[in-house]
Image: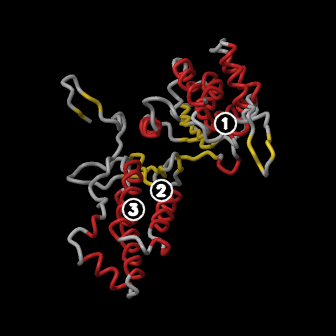
Amino acid sequence: MAAAVKIVFEPIFEADMLACSFGFRPKRSPHDALQVLIDECGRGRRWVVETDIASCFSAIPHEQLIQAVEERVCDQAALKLLRVLLRAGVMEDGLVRREVTGTPQGGPLSPLLCNVYLHRLDRQWSTREHGVLVRFADDVAVMCKSREQAEAALQRLRDLLGELGLQPKEAKTRIVHLEVGGEGLDFLGFHHRLVRSRPRDGRRPVIFLARWPANKAMQHARDRVRELTDRRRLLLPIEAIVGDVNAFLHGWVGYFKYGHSARRFSEIRQYVRMRIALFISKRHRRSRHFGLRALLRFTPNEFGLIRLYGIVVSPRVGKPWREKPNAGGERRR
């Protein structure tokens, strides 16, 4: 039912969505949002407000959300169905608990309703006064030209969210100055930091915004690999284990390859090799040295383990990350 409502509502609201919103929208992705950070940093906006909205999906007031939907939808049957979905409640310990805030958790409709409600924030934002807003659902970054503008932008965010009955998560709210040798920020899984390139062939060094998998993303990858190579799976053949690890790495690397991630990819591959070697040694009740020797020598390609070298794509200012077809239909970058 929620999926059907999404099919009806999405084209209606998508026509009004603004360029600063990237999350869960057709033909928009996290990398489109990340490209804005690269471009705006290159234009001199190096003061960044970073935050996310506290309990966004569960804190949106139902009546105010319905009012936001009614701005574009007047069909009473559709609005009645939406009210039913919002008030359906959840089962806990045999009892149904109905809330007066929040969107249906885990369903296809929830991200759309979040965007519909936060569209009120987007349309009241002034880029000229407060900087460039980048919003991916409830994750927010604002690129500013000065500390004063960043402080004003943060206060503006607090005010607008307060009008919506929401607030920023204080533990994740701060102002960061991007400078060479300074701290960076984490946004959409990447750690961003301003760095200076090494001089090559007589060329002057270039200062640019680099990004690579954040520490949380690295830990998530290690945790997942550890689950896939756990001793509870010792009865499975090694080829099956490697296949599961490869499936995870394809998705993880596919996301993080659009960055300066080569060093961190190398760290993850070394960790994967260690875990698989340990798995082999446990399976055969032999030493770790035996497991590593089996991985490196018993097969010509380490049981099909994928390689993570030479696949990164470095983002650049003004150059879209997404490949686009040219007039002849060919792909170009």
Q: Which mark is residue 104?
A: 1
Nearer to us of marks 1 and 2 is 1
Nearer to us of marks 3 and 2 is 3
Please give the name of the residue rendered at 35% of the width and 61% of the height, measured from the top-left corner: 243
Is residue 154 positioned above or below 10 on the image? Answer: below
Q: Quadrant of the C terminus?
A: top left
Label whose residue precedes the other's in the sequence (3 or 2): 2
Relative to 76, 203 lies left or right = left
- Looking at the rendered structure, the secondary structure element under dot 3 is helix
Mark 3 lies on residue: 245
Is residue 105 positioned above or below 287 on the image? Answer: above
- Cα distance in 3D space between marks 1 and 2: 44 Å
Residue 282 screen position, x and y as percent: 42, 81
Please give the name of the residue rendered at 61% of the width and 29% of the height, measured from the top-left corner: 1
Residue 39 screen position, x and y as percent: 42, 36
> Between 86 and 288, which is closer to the camera in this rendering?
86
Q: Are marks 1 and 2 in contact (CB under 8 Å)?
A: no
Estimate how packed mark 2 is, as few (under 14), some (14 to 19) or many (20 or more) residues with alpha carbons within 10 Å. few
